[in-house]
Image: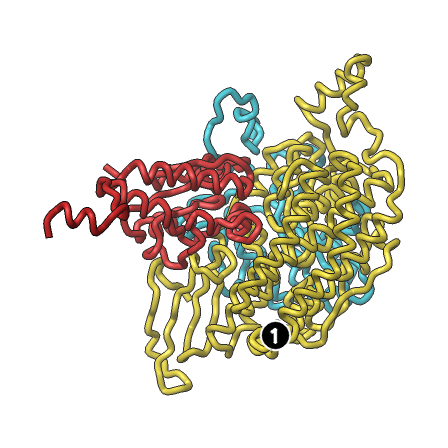
Chain colours: A red, B cyan, C yellow
Amino acid sequence: MGLEELAESLGQNVLTTTLGKVVGWGRGNSVWPAQFGLACCAIEMIATATAGVDIARFGSEAMRASPRQSDLLIVSGRVSQKMAPVLRTVFDQMPEPKWVISMGACASTGGVFNNYALLQGVDKIVPVDVYIPGCPPRPEDLLNALMILQERIKAQGIQPRQ
Amino acid sequence: MISDQLIIDRGVSAGDEWITVPAESVHEALAALRSDGYRLLTFLTCVDHLADHSREWPFRFEIVYQLRNLETREQLRVRTFIDGDPPRIDSVHDLFPPANWDERETYDLFGVVFNDHPDLSRILMPDDWVGHPLRRDYPVGGETVEFSEEHERWQTAPDEA
Amino acid sequence: MSTPEGVTIVKTGEKGHFGGEILTVNFGPHHPSTHGVLRLIVDLDGEMIRGIKPVIGYLHTGIEKQMEALRWQQGVVVTDRHDYLSPPINNLAYALAVERLMGVEVPPRADALRVIMSELTRLSSHLVWMGTSGLELGAMSMLMYCFRERDTILDMNEEISGFRMHTSYIRPGGVFADATPRFLEMLDKFIGEMPGHIDEYEDLLTMNPIWRARTIGIGRLSPEDAKVLGATGPMLRGSGVAWDLRKTMPYSGYENYDFEVATSNDCDCYGRYLVRIREMREAVKILRQALDRLPDGPVNVDDRKMLPPPREELETSMEAVIHHFKLFTEGYSVPAGDVYVAVESGRGENGCYIVSDGTHKPRRVKFRAASFANLQALERMALNHMVADMIAIIGTADTVLGDVDR
Ligand code: SF4
C-alpha cells in the first residue's frame, strides 16, 4: 500500500500530534488520588466525590487505598509531627509521576494552629504543586485545584518533573 | 462513705461542687467516693499553676478528677495538689478504667508520673518527644508570623517565672 | 506491647487456637477503613482478633495549648476544629462554660438558635457517619444519599453564619448573628423533607441483608461495661442505657422540648445504628418545635464588656468606640475559678473544663472528648471477632480522630 492509498483508506480518522501531548492528555484526565484523609478537610474531600459535586467528571473519582496505585496525594488536613514521617512514606511509595495538592490552611501553613504539635506547612516534607486556601476549602475549590493541576500536567508532557 | 478527715477543703465553683484531698490518700478517697455511688470518672486532668497569682496555691500541679453519680446525677470534682520533679501520684485506673488513657495523656502532656500504672507511656506525642507540652513553661512553638503583634506574647509562661 | 515503628507483621511464636501462630499485625495509621488516622496493633490468631491496642496521637493538634495562648473570644475558632463533625456543639460547650464562669445568661432567642444549630449538627454528623460506615460495609450508595442532605445542612450553615463547616456561630454571650428569613425558610423546608429522607435510608439499610449480617451480634458491649468504660452517646444508648445529657442534665432550654431518648437493647453494632436513626428522627422533631416556638428578641447579651457594640453605635458614641477597641485589643477577662460543662454531641458527652486565673486568657482548657473514652471500649468490643468485623466496630463507634487526639 502506498502512502496515498493509506491516507485514503483512513479518511478523516487520523490526528497527528506529539507524543508528549498524548501522554499529557492521558495523564491529565486520569489523575487518581490516594485515599488519604487527615482531618476536617478530608470530609470536604469526601464531599467532592459525592453526587452533588462529582469529581468523576474530571476522571479522578478512583480514590485508591494504596499509594502504589495513585498519582496524586491530596493532603487534606493538618499534619502533626507524629504523622509527618507517615505522610512522607506514603508519598515515597507512590510511583512517578506524582503530584501533591495541599488542601486547606493547615496543610499549607499550619492554619490557625501555630504551635508545637503541627507541621507548619506540608511543603516542608513533600513538594507541593497546588495549594488551596480555606478552612476547609469548599469542594468546588478542590475541583478548581484539580483543573489547575490538569492544565499543568497536560503542559508538562512526557517528562513531568525535571 | 468518705471520711471527713480526707477532705481538706470543700467549696463550689460556678455551680460545681468540689473537694480537696491530700495527694497521698487520693486512691483511698476515690475508692470511698466510688462506693458512695460516684461510679463514673468523666475525666481526669492536670492544671499547671505556675505563676498563677489569682490565689495561693499549695503546689504547682493540681490534679482534677471529675466524678459523676449516674443514678442521682450528682457531680463532684476532686482536687489534689502535687509537686516534685517529676510530680508523682497514685494511679486510679483500677477503680475507674477510663482513667487509664487519661493518666497516660496527663503523663504525656504534663509529665505527671502515676505510680502503678500498667503502661505509662506517651499517648499523643511521638515516643521520642522531649518535654511535656502543656506545662506552662513549655513554649507554644510554631513559627513567627510576620507583622503580628501577638506572637511575641505567645508564651504561656509569664516573664517572671 | 511495644512494636517498633514501621514493622508490619511480627511473629510471636505463641501457638494459636487453630494450630497456627499468633501474629502481631499493624493497621494504619494510613488505612482506608480506620476513619482517619488511627493506628491499631492487632494480635491475630488466623482471622481472629486476640488482642488489640489502639495507638493514637497522629492528629494531635495542640488545641489545648493553643487555647491558652488565645484570648477568650478568639478561642471559639479553635473549639470548632477538634471534633470536626460537630463544630457548633463544641462551640456550645465552650460558650456555656465561659458564660457560667462570668455568670451571664443568654436571651431565649439565642438559646433556641443554639438548639437549632446543635440539632442540625447532630443530623449532619450522623449523616456523615452513616455514609462512611455504609461505604465501608459495602453499601456504597449510602454515601451519595447522606451527603446530599448534609449539603443542604451545610448550605443552611452558610446562610446563617457565612461558613459551611466551622461556623463559630455560637459564642460566649450569644450567637454570631440573628437567623435570616431565608434561613428560617430553608429550615422549614428541610424539616418537611427530612423524615422522608430518613425513611429512604432505612429502606436502604435497616432490612438490608448484608448490612444486617455485618452488624447484628458484632461488637457486643454490655450495659455494665459501657457504663464502667465511660462510653457515652449512641455507644451507651445502643447498650440500652437511657442516658442523654439533653434529658438528664439539660442545658440551653432542652428541658422545654418534647423528645425521647433513643435506646436499643441490642448492645451491638446494629443497635448503635438503630439508635442513630431514631436520634435523627428525634432531632427533626426538636427542630420543628424550636422553629415553631422561636421567641423574638435579641440574640446576644447586652453587655458591652463581653460583646462588641453594634455597628451604628460606633459612629455616634465615644464609649462604644472605647469598648470596641478594648475588646479587640485586650479582650475581656473572666473571673478566676473553674467550671465543667458537658453537652451531648453526636458522639456522646462533649465536655469543656475551663480554669480561669482572672486574666484575659484561659489558664487551662480541657476538652472531654467523647471519642477518646469510646475508643477505649474498642478492645472490649473487638476481642474474638474476625478482622473484617473490626471495621464494622470501629465504624459504628463513630470515633472522630480529631476529637480523640485534640
Ligand atoms: S484547614 Fe481547617 S478544615 Fe482543614 S484541617 Fe485545618 S482546621 Fe480543619
Image coordinates for residue C263, horizontal then vertical, percent? 74, 69
Q: Nearer the viewer, residue C17 or C280?
A: C280
Q: Nearer the viewer, residue B26 or C250?
A: C250
Image coordinates for residue A17, horizontal then vertical, percent? 24, 40
Residue pointed to by mark 1: C208
Image coordinates for residue A65, horizontal then vertical, percent? 41, 59
Q: Secondary structure at mark 1?
A: loop
Quarter of the image with the C terminus of chain A is top left
**Which three-letter amino acid code belongs to the residue tagged 1?**
Asn
Image coordinates for residue C272, horizontal then vertical, percent? 66, 69
Say whether residue C112 is left or right of residue C164: right
Residue sitting at 35 percent across and 53 percent down?
A70
Q: Is residue A121 above or below residue C55?
A: above
Question: Is disc 1 surrounded by few (<14), some (14 to 19) or many (20+) residues within 10 Å?
Answer: few
Q: Nearer the viewer, residue C383 or C129?
A: C129
Residue sitting at 37 percent across and 74 percent down?
C23
Q: Is residue C187 visible?
A: yes
Q: Is residue B87 visible?
A: no
- Quarter of the rendered image showing ligand 1: top right
Residue sitting at 47 percent across and 41 percent down?
A103
